Image (cartoon, grey):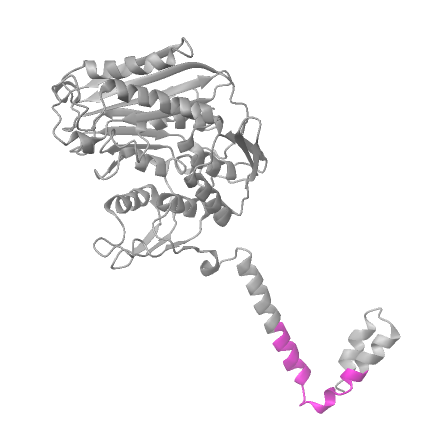
Amino acid sequence: QGFIIPFFILRCYPTPTTAKCEVYKETHHYPQYPPHHHLTAAAEMGKSSATAFSKRKNSGGGSSSSSRTLRFEDGATQFRQRIVVSLLSHRPLLIRNIRADDLQNPGLKDYEASFLRLIDQLTNGSKIEINSTGTQLRFHPGTLLGGTDLKHACPDSRSIGWFLEGILPLAPFGKESLAITFTGITDGLCQVDPSADYWNRSGLPLFSAFGIGVENDFDEEKPQIRVLQRAAAPESEGNGKVLFTCPIVKQLQSIDMVDPGKIKRIRGTAISCKIVSSSMAARVAYAAKGIFHKLLPDVWIHTDVHTSKRHRCGPSPGIMMVVSSESTTGIILTAECCMDHRQHQQGVNTDSSLIPSKTGLEIPEDLGKRGACMLLEEIRRGGCIDTSCQSLAFLWMALTPEDVSRIRVGTLSQYSIETLRLIKHAFDVEFKVTPDMESKTVLLSCLGTGYRNMAKAST
């Protein structure tokens, strides 16, 4: 009785006779087991197969959050990028050892906590868990909402550009269009953070390349970054204001930016805040134009002077310059430089038309020449985007439709290399990196994941 069922099953399959006999000999021993043992074995087999299927399901991106969690043990490295990737990939995030070696000030800094409050304001359902020492962060992403008339106060430890850079990749994927006003420092920290003027000149053309705001006919419905009031480092007292607006899209479009073209024009702005002598900005622009005019005639750098009474700028003085070049193929490269406010606090008289060079400070002419040389260095490296925009372009390339996107860059920065590794870890997208020895540039290409903004209404 114990081998009737296995023999019947074997008769259903066209197996050779020898195979039948071998299996029959094995099943002939079934009566030695307790009654109904074959049913128990089948139940155990079904349970084990169900367990194996559950493991395969979880490993393939199922509902288990432990296998999908993005885990990082190296602290606050790429803090903003990891939160952005967690939101876009809908995967939980766990960051450990955040400045665990710092005995005096371990854990998150004030600007990182402020960025988490900004993300909480832009999303719905996000869950943020921080341990008592601040060295561990657990982030469960929610849904991007967007919204208008939003406001966020940035601490003076970082400029507005640092927060603006963090939310640029998220802005087009909200439920509704985004309009947010930042208050804080606008100028004077370009050594560590790209300013709002930089993103206005170099970031917005990248929005158009990926099809963000292209279908909108009115200027109010296109991406905009407007500096309403300026405040230089180190103190802003809430006077600096930047308005960022961005429409939403259903899906990005692929890009093919491989031809940098030839430089045809240069545009720029020399800015001064709370400096009595209005000629300081003019001297910066004049020195920069003196270098550019040796290479091409179409150069225009205007001055933008802000005072406390007329423009309500911040209490700290500052000078900066942002210049950009445009090629025959529409490629825009941008560079910026500013006065180091730490050196300025050594006792410089802002009423003076000259900055003493004995204290190690730059005179306006040196500042203008340095900014011009920084732009020329970006042009010498080649490529279709400048160094600070590489990470934003790579992230959006991974989110494009399932088509090949290509871009040419001059030199990959270390931050961009870490971004490529993060994209591989979160989206499983690999970039093909091809060095071009003739032009001394690097060509990167990838196949997009077909990311779609499911929060956008179909109508």
Tell me if residue 79 comes above or below residue 350 in the rendering.
below
Q: Is residue 80 located in the magenta-colored stretch of the structure?
A: no
Between 346 and 235, the one nearer to me in the picture: 346
- In the image, what residue occupies the spot 27% across and 34% down? 160
Measured as percent of width and height from the top left, residue 149 is found at: 28, 32
- In the image, what residue occupies the spot 36% across and 43% down? 80
Measured as percent of width and height from the top left, residue 54 is found at: 56, 64
Tell me if residue 56 comes above or below residue 239 in the rendering.
below
Query: Position of 39 compared to 202: left or right?
Result: right
Between 310 and 4, the one nearer to me in the picture: 310
Tell me if residue 150 comes above or below residue 116 in the rendering.
above
Query: Position of 319 compared to 394: left or right?
Result: left
- What segment carries the magenta color? 25-46
Q: Quadrant of residue 143?
A: top left
Measured as percent of width and height from the top left, residue 280 is found at: 20, 16
Q: Is residue 233 visible?
A: no
Q: Is residue 35 visible?
A: yes
Between 127 and 437, the one nearer to me in the picture: 437
Q: Is residue 29 located in the magenta-colored stretch of the structure?
A: yes
- In the image, what residue occupies the spot 40% across and 47% down? 82
Prevalent SS, magenta region:
helix
Between 42 and 432, the one nearer to me in the picture: 432
Measured as percent of width and height from the top left, residue 74 is found at: 38, 53
Query: Position of 264 compared to 430: left or right?
Result: left
Q: Quadrant of residue 2?
A: bottom right
